[in-house]
Image (cartoon, coloured by chain):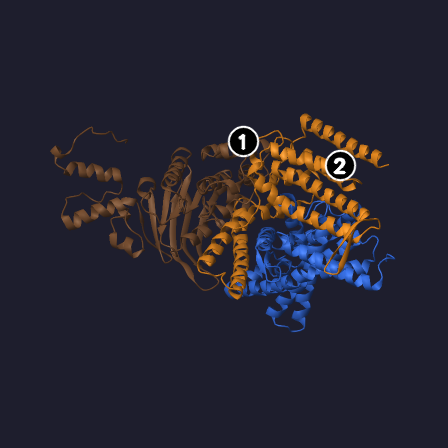
Amino acid sequence: MKAIAVTGVHFTYDDGTEALSGVDFHVSEGEFVAVLGSNGSGKTTLIGLLVGLLKAKSGRIAIGGQEIGSLSAEELYKRVGLVFQNPNDQLFAATVEEDVAFGPRNLNLPEEEVQARVTEVLTAVAALPLRGRAIHHLSFGEQKRVSLAGVLAMRPAVLILDEPTAGLDPAGEAQMMQLLKKLNREERMTVILATHSVDMLPLFANRIYVLDRGRVLQQGPSEEIFCHQEMIVRAKLRLPYVSRLMYEMKRHDGVPIDGLPLTIGEARAQLLELIPKEMILPGIEEIGP
Amino acid sequence: MDGIWTKKRYASRFAAVVAAIAGVLASLPAPAFAMHISEGLLPASWAVLWYVVAIPFVALGLRELQRRNEEFPYFKPLVGLVGAAVFLISCMPIPVPTAGTCSHPCGTGIAAILIGPGLTVVVASIALTLQALFLAHGGLTTLGANIVAMGVAGSYVGFGTWLIARRLGVPWIAAAFLAGLLSDWATYAMTSFELTAAFHAGSSFSAMFSLILIAFVPTQLPLGILEGILCAGALRFVRNRKPELLRMAAAGGAA
Amino acid sequence: MFDLFSDIFTYRDNALTRIDPRAKLVIALAALIAVLTAERVVLPLCVFGVCLGTVATLRIPAKLVTARLAAPLSIVAVLVVIQTFFTGTTPLFAFTVAGWHFTAKAEGLRQGALLGARVLGSVSVVFLLSVVTPAHRIFQAFRWFRISRNWLEIAILMYRYIFVLMDQVADLAAAQRLRLGYTARGRAMRSFTALAGSTIIHSLEQAKRTHDAMRLRGYRGTMPFGPLPALGRRDRLITALCLIGIVSARLLEWGVSK
């Protein structure tokens, strides 16, 4: 079953900017899909359409098999949840607890259920100790996680995130991605994230859509996408750094590398095979998996 | 008037009082905060009376909020955000040439142009409550009096000026200047009136009123002009950069 | 850039922050009424002393206390001076400055001192309340007092976004200063109006995004509020004791004044 089915969608803003021209975008239930694109590629517009903030001029958008226009607001927001890039857009209550409870209370749930959900989602994003804190006293990373919790509290089938790691430090970035992976693998939640940072994606995303100037340039698993160096450059993106290194070694130095490693683990495995055995001192220091 | 206050002595006393008040006001750490009547200053009966005057205006604004919120669902966030902006603007220090210190604008003029006078009263009542509770500016007991001075007098005079000036064909930038200027002065006149009403016992009302009014002049005359410049300048800034945003508010016809 | 809310203390855990905000609000209100109706300086000054002592016990930095009390204190000074020299009939002492005669009078001094004491007393009550109760708990208490829901919704949004806009504006002001935007009076005024203008632009754009985010979480024009917890026995007891204390102090003062 398709969680999201977008076919031939066009969108033009009031000022005449054509943001999307004929986009097809399909996501199955339980998938982890990344929408990769530079600034102004149409990522945010696509997201706006998926959550009903914008209305497509032409084309079809179906969420969970139903036309988006036929869904009531409440049905729609139980199916898709959006985490904004800037947590300030989304954290409008005074405290963490009140903010996370906002969605469930709008669904008119009984108060015990509201409190249970708040506890559950705050635990899920590792933010339970922040429960009584004021939003304006949180760090940026904490704000990001709390805004994710606020959306999770609606229990959406599809979770959409706009630049979830933008502005986070490396530890925060890793924590956020691990969290999303856990939601996807353990809770079977469909995750769609829009981003232009490529390094983390091969580790997490099942599939990648590359968007450029309102069109889908290519879509497929990350191995396939990052093989097309020229397409990636044309979309004003880049390869993950480790792939770039391996690509250069293969092309300019003739190092015999199979395909293109996308993660540090893959690259390491390949290099270990190529480096003469006598140069490797096994067991100097154990590295985790 | 007291018998001992002969005409000549009255004149010299009058001058002395004006000089004294003006001098002290100018040397206060934050002269504009004298603009809000301080916590505990008004006697209980006057505090209650000004509450009674203020509440209908706030209620009127809240009814308008409810009505327009049904029409435009984004209206509450809009009023809240404009309120936050005006609150911050009113905390920005502006240099007052005559006092040699910094003072603060009221921001009611620009708020009235953006969201209309009714909602400006609501926003002002919240801003004043927050200031009274957390910044010791104004007060809970004097909240009613301060809402009447800053919210009611400031925003209705500011908005009325804007409306009349626009009807008369005055260019919007001049209209905004006048709205800022007069809303500021109206606030001061009202504050002076409230202080006089509470404290004129023993001397004549008009004498004390003009006395307090004149005492405010050295700081308030220029501050009102600065407020006018601020109001016009800020409106020009928004109109030049993002005119479409003014349509969102669209209450004061600023767009 | 701005000396704004220092609500960090309200999140500390102490005996006063644990009291229900409704109880604190009722007690504060009673204390304000007592101070405002006092006819002698003793009661307001006692309230001032108790509040200041409590604030000191809570180890609120002296800098914050003086910052908050500076404006009211200077108002008190002005009041005492003006009332002493310009009202009343019984002369205390007199002096001449630059040809102007000043005569201090007993009734004026008394009246000025009373006004001053009332200001100090009531300001300290509210200050104490504000360092032991965070804003959102006060809003919660307001709900119990049947303050209009719409008013509270706007208040909550305003309070939250003051901090967001403040961050944005502070960055902008710093950028202006770095580019020497405040070095001459004309330029300072231009920088200032630009700052105010962009605060408004930020706020209008933020309003749209915030409303979008609210809508996506089921907002339909009314913010949902959770239920108010019942007032605990301990809080009721504290309120009753404090009210009895305040009323008896006020009655005692009334007896003495007569």
Give the letter of the chain under mark 2.
C
Q: What is the drawing colour of chain B? A: blue
**Mark 1 closeness class: few <14, some 14–19, many ≥20 residues within 10 Å:** few
Q: Nearer the viewer, residue C166 or C156?
A: C166
Report, in whole angstroms, how far the alpha carbon at label 2 lies from the one at label 1. 49 Å
User: What's the residue at 81%, 46% (across, down)?
Assistant: C106
Q: Is residue C55 above or below residue B180?
A: above
In the rendered image, which residue does mark 1 sit on? A116
Q: What is the drawing colour of chain A? A: brown
Do we see residue B215 in this rendering?
yes
Quarter location, residue A285: top left
Q: Position of residue A246 (x, y in %)?
A: 21, 45
Q: What is the drawing colour of chain C? A: orange
Extreme residue toward the bottom, this view: B169
User: What's the residue at 12%, 36% (across, down)?
Assistant: A276
Mark 2 lies on a secondary structure that is helix
